[in-house]
Image (spheres, rainbow, N blue to C red):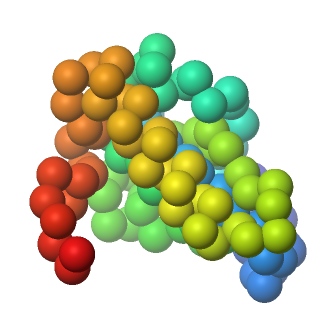
Amino acid sequence: MRKDTQDRHEKACKGNGAGYVYALVEIDDKASFEQITYADPDFIKHNEVAYIGETSNPWQRFGTHRTKKSRKIGMVIIDESDSDFPVPEIQMKENQAMFNYALAHGKLPKWNKGGLTFAGA
């Protein structure tokens, strides 16, 4: 994907009021913005996932993860907000996705470190 296309995607998401739940998956090759895909919420039950998170701007978040976590990751959007209360809805959906993953795999994704503590509660 060209840089100007990526910039347009990031700008389009800025302030749009939507929220997304995503999974990061490890891939064999260096990631590009073509590694952002959409899938159904059951994706996390059937695939090994490195991280589950939430964002209002998947394009910008993917770029940050590629820099901080790994250059060899893909992002799969597994759910999005569809109510008038996108922030609490996406937080709930993110927690549900982590819970579903833990039930299916017996553990949380390796980069979801805070999911086993009540830090801040």
Is 119 above or below relative to 22? below
Q: Which quadrant would the C terminus be assigned to in this image?
A: bottom left
Horizontal side, residue 70 vs residue 93: left or right: left
Q: Residue at x 68, y 28 (%)?
A: 40
Horizontal side of residue 59 vs 9, given as left or right? left
Q: Is residue 14 above or below residue 88?
A: below
Residue at horizontal 46%, vertical 15%? 46
**Residue at screen point 59% across, 68% down:** 88
Res. 23 in view: yes
Above-or-below relation of 100 to 117: above
Q: Is residue 15 left or right of residue 21?
A: right
The part of the image, by quadrant, that contains residue 78 is top right
Q: Position of residue 1 (x, y in %)?
A: 74, 53
Q: Nearer the viewer, residue 49 or 121?
A: 121
Q: Say left or right for 5 vs 52.
A: right
- Do we see residue 113 in this rendering? no
Q: Position of residue 82 (x, y in %)?
A: 81, 55
Picture coordinates of residue 45, whole percent (x, y): 45, 20
Question: How many marks overall?
Answer: 0
Q: Quadrant of residue 49?
A: top left
Compare residues 44 and 13 and report the one nearer the observer: 44
Q: Residue 52: x, y in percent?
A: 42, 47
Identify the residue at the far bottom of this view. Answer: 15
Q: Residue furthest front?
A: 121
> Which of the pair 103/67 is nearer the observer?
103
At 82% from the left and 70% from the top, the residue drawn is 84
To which quarter of the image does residue 98 belong? top left
